[in-house]
Amino acid sequence: MKINGVELFMKCPKCFHNHSRVLDSRPHEDGDEVRRRRECERCGFRFRTYERKEETPLIIKKRDGTRQEFDRDKIIRGLMRACEKRPVAIDTIEKIALDVEQEIRQSEKPEIESQVIGEMVLERLSEIDEVAYVRFASVYRQFDNINIFLDELKELLNSDNKE
């Protein structure tokens, strides 16, 4: 494939040949990505690639004052740990991470505090799985004793009783 006279290569993950052909392209995840099914011209191996538009970087201000670029995969990894051995589909986890990222980008703030992101994740997780919520909260809120943990559980139980 050529764009602006420059040939683009997509290496086959199996044989590392530089040429593959696109079999199918379709929008993915709310139209912000394109998923392409490809086939290696040498070995015939089929694989997928994802194309995402380049976004302006979001900067996250951490509790210790350091800053780093936003990474949706970090949210997914944290959710995967919290949802381990729970009946939460990977699609649900990915949707939470995508929703959080979209909400952050819509705020149009160039920098956001990590605590705000944690609260956004907790808000969505509380609607899906209470055990995963408590797991995520225990790490995110850094429960350092059982009383803080119990207070969080009581608050969760009280919110359930109100509904």
Image: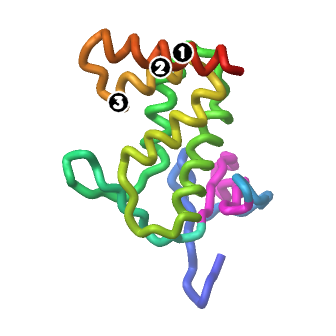
Tag 2 residue: 134
Start-end of magenta stretch: 31-52
Task: Report how far apart the C-alphas of labels 1 and 2 lie in the structure.
Answer: 5 Å
**Nearer to the camera, 143 or 19:** 143
Total numbered labels placed on residues in the image: 3
Q: Residues within 10 Å of mark 2 (few under 14, many from 20)?
A: many
Query: From the viewer's perspective, is residue 99 above or below residue 92?
Result: below
Tag 3 residue: 141
Tag 1 residue: 131
**Image position of 22 (left or right of 152):** right
The kind of residue on which mark 3 rests is: Arg
Q: Residue at x 42, y 42 (%)?
A: 74
Residue at the far bottom in the pictured view:
5
Quadrant position of residue 112: bottom left
The kind of residue on which mark 1 rests is: Val
Query: From the viewer's perspective, is residue 20 above or below residue 74?
Result: below
Residue 84 within the magenta-colored segment of the rendering: no
